[in-house]
Amino acid sequence: MAGGRKCVIVSHRPMPLPTCSTDMSAVSDDWTKRLIRSLAVACSLALAACTSIPRTPYTAADASSSRVLDIEGLRRYADEPVTKFSFEQDKATGSRTYLALSGGGADGAYGVGVLNGWTAARNRPTFSVVSGVSTGGLIAPFAFLGSQYDDTLRELYTSGIAESLLNDPSIIRVLFGSGLFGNTRLRELVARYVGPEIMAQVARENAKGRRLLVVTTDLDTQRTAIWDMGKIAAVGTPEALKLFRDVMAASASIPLVFPPILIEAEGQGRRFQEMHVDGGVTAPVLTLPEALLLQGRLPGNAKMDIYILVNKKIERNFELVANSTIDVASRSLSSITQSQTRSVILSTYDFAQRNHLGFHLSYIERDYPAPPSEGFDTGYMRALYQYGYEKAAGGQAWTSRMP
């Protein structure tokens, strides 16, 4: 398809559009089915070439030495050597407490409920490290800063404010643009809640040795990028604030639904833009770097309590799948994500057992009612928030065993 060429497709019959979700980072199984169905119909009508937005070319060599904001160490990659990561002890407690927030779309309401219920139980730790992927990437800065932002998180996930993100979709933009929904509203939502004061607070906590990490997927290199948000915040410039917001938006930018986020970078004296999307594409949840899990031990006998907050169901469940392409594709995609999540959790559990680390897991139980057939809605998110809140407030949110 030639860049720069545009096409117009006229249909005498309106194409069915997928039901809009109140989620800010993912799609329900039913919504996925409707999207696949609409794509199939639209593809059958597509007879012209599509438009592509030109990018500045760069090479793998450029990418291998790239920097953002001309500063080293603002991000690492999950597959880098263990020596690239720091595992110093918390000076106050002698160990580290690590909260890992998974993806899960509107089911992020569960994680927010758990955090707020944990506050109500009065035993929520101040975490040494917080990581977030996708919807977890949107939650992470507020979870990192503590209970003072509980109300902010509750508003984000139960007020229905995210519904505006998914208004006025156009199926043509899926086929002939970079995403079904523009990222303007997603950026505006992040900017509304993340301003200079939030960044300054993150920078102050970073100076104390605490770490805030948000995950994106670098599509050009197919690598999991781990952004050190505290270091970005510490830069303190308007450019750093833009990058901070862009990383949060990129972590929640699921392909096809939202366009990718292009992040300015420099490598080998050349400037170009990296393409970043939802961190959940390559890492449904970030616990420990790949090399560390393979190595099997923490450097220097470090101590750590790991809390994995999964914003989804992770137990297998039976469902009679209709013998249609759409239903098979939807169920397959859901199974892939669930399997990847279980794999990461199991690897982390095994690592924790061998190193005598604390392991704590929270997730949505298998028998929790599914969302409405037409997709996520505010009522479902409010109920899920309350479910997570009551579990945590009653001391029932966490288990030290695998399901």
Image (cartoon, grey):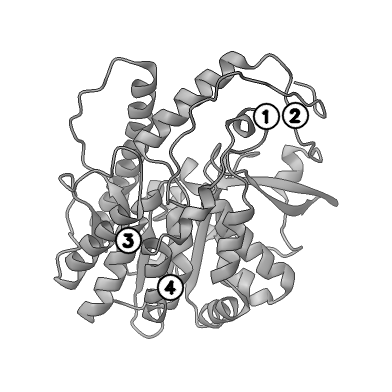
**Do the numbered discs 3 and 1 sit on residues whose CB atoms are within 8 Å?**
no
Q: As displayed, is residue 136 above or below residue 14?
A: below
Residue that mark 2 sits on:
51
Mark closest to the chain's N terminus, 4 or 3: 3
Instruction: Verify CB contact (< 8 Å) between mark 1 and mark 2.
Output: yes
Tag 3 residue: 111
Task: Name the foreground residue: 268 vs 318.
Answer: 318
Q: Is residue 292 left or right of residue 304?
A: right
| 65 lies above or below 245 | above
Examine the image and state in which quarter residue 72 appears: bottom right
Three-letter amino acid code of the residue under disc 3: Gly
Residue at image location 72% in from the left, 65% down from the top? 71
From what the image shows, is residue 41 above or below residue 300?
above
Question: Residue at (34%, 21%) from the top-left corner?
Answer: 328
Choose the circle earlier in sequence order: 3 or 2: 2
> Mark 1 and mark 4: span between their CA atoms?
36 Å
- Distance between the alpha carbons at the discs numbered 4 and 2: 39 Å
Q: Which residue is mark 4?
A: 152
Which type of secondary structure does the marked residue at label 1 adopt?
helix
Which of discs 3 and 1 lies nearer the camera? The answer is: 1
Please state which amino acid type lies under the numbered disc 1.
Answer: Phe
Pointer 4 or 2: first along the chain: 2
Type of amino acid at the residue the image marks with label 4:
Thr
Q: Which residue is mark 1?
A: 176
Residue lying at the far right of the rendered structure: 269
Name the image quarter holding residue 358.
bottom left
**For the residues marked 4 and 3, what is the alpha-carbon distance in whole angstroms?**
13 Å
Q: Is residue 271 visible?
A: yes
